[in-house]
Image (tube, rainbow, N blue to C red):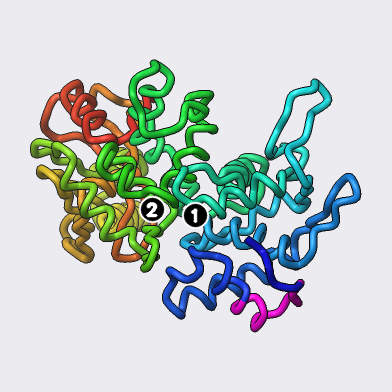
Amino acid sequence: MLHSEDISINYEQLDVFYNRYFAYYRSLQAYYKKRFVNRCLIFLNQKYIDGINDFEPDNRIKALIAASAVQLTLGLERWEMDYFDLIIVHPQDYKSNTGLKFSGETNLAGYVKLSWKTFLRGYTFNNDNVNLGLHEFSHALHFSGLKGGEQDYFLDNYFNNWLSSAYEAFNDLKLGRPSIFRPYGGTNINEFMSVCFEHFFESPQQIKETYPLLYYSTACLLNQLPDATNTQLNVRAVMMDEKSKLLPGLEHYHFSSPVSAAMLVAIVPLIYTVLSAGLTNVISLCFEALFVLLYLRYDFSYTQLTINNREFEIKRGRFIFKSRKQQFNPIACLISFRSGSDTENGNYELIFYDTSDERFYEEDLNLKQGDSDSLIKALKTNRITYYEG
């Protein structure tokens, strides 16, 4: 694969090198090529890539390792995997202390090991859905967040929702059913994630045809659609819409914010003071002013959520601030529900994603109509994560 002389680590030489040797780079538009090279330069500056057993990685090897990590994360805002600052490169597959042979390893001690021979094979043969670099850097991306590294905002908030779309394919592997994914993905859900990401970059259409919800969820998670000639990035809004079309939807449900507890507490002394001292008493006026302030705060933050089939609407404000902000999103943007402390009165906590500002929101809501049992069932069929209490 590599026939050129060694290169220098600068923008111009990396651009030429990737255009020649990295197919994914050639599929990017000019704007994203610039982002790609700049991130590779940052990666190479932040990570220490070292060989072992007298194997000395040259700049070409280092550049391709950086490119693999950046390929996986190009659609993310935070992508550095900063918990892992050491990458150890073996010339061949290697044996562990137990005598088992390995091609790669992502160790929670803070390093990644790669067999250069197997890594290179992953980019030489790009139609077998096996890619060591993508596999190990998928682990590094996930584990970095678990170990306290700076995690991408969307990935951190959406990952559990991605899992809800992944378990069908994962269970097919575990139960020995026919699957497009290689058997190693059935080892555990972490290995399935890495196997899925490898497959997504080499055969995305196969995932789309077999597990379409997983396809759209993975595209949302990584914020890209790989393609041999035209890879697309910043695709989340479109992918949320497409995923929603595949979901069965929910019957009409209506939620609203619960009454402010502070208002309920304040109204008792207010009524007592007014009845005993009159409306214009100084103490009564203080309680009245406090109650008005509490109400204004409640009214401003009041939220109504209406789910109707495959979309939901958010309205803000109850009376004074009514309709100060309205949001419409496809049902795939509903991320999770959690039953609150007062389930008998339909108290729930909701997390949803708003495509207009690309932020996640958490709301305390009361279910006003509909049976909670039917709601929970409907949530699960729409791949919306539900938590008890």
- Residue 121 location (% of width, % of height): 60, 48
Residue 33 among magenta residues: no
From the viewer's side, name the closer residue of 319 and 53.
Answer: 53
Q: Please report the residue visible at 80 percent of the width from the left and 58 percent of the height from the top.
A: 57
Residue kind at label 2, given as amino acid type: Phe
What is the C-alpha distance between the residues marked 1 and 2? 9 Å
From what the image shows, is residue 368 above or below residue 150? above
The answer to which quarter of the image holds residue 177 is top left
From the viewer's side, name the closer residue of 35 and 300.
Answer: 35
Q: Please report the residue visible at 76 percent of the width from the left and 50 percent of the height from the top.
A: 87
Query: Is residue 281 something one can see in this rendering?
Result: no
Q: Secondary structure at mark 2?
A: strand
Q: Please report the residue visible at 77 percent of the width from the left and 35 percent of the height from the top.
A: 94
Residue 15 among magenta residues: yes
Q: Quadrant of the N terminus?
A: bottom right
From what the image shows, is residue 373 above or below residue 128? above
The answer to which quarter of the image holds residue 389 is top left
- Residue 231 location (% of width, % of height): 39, 65
Find disc 2 in the rendering and name its residue.
Answer: 360
From the viewer's side, name the closer residue of 315 and 231.
Answer: 231
Residue 217 lies left or right of residue 377; in this view the side is: right
Start-end of magenta stretch: 6-16
Find disc 1 in the rendering and name its residue.
Answer: 153
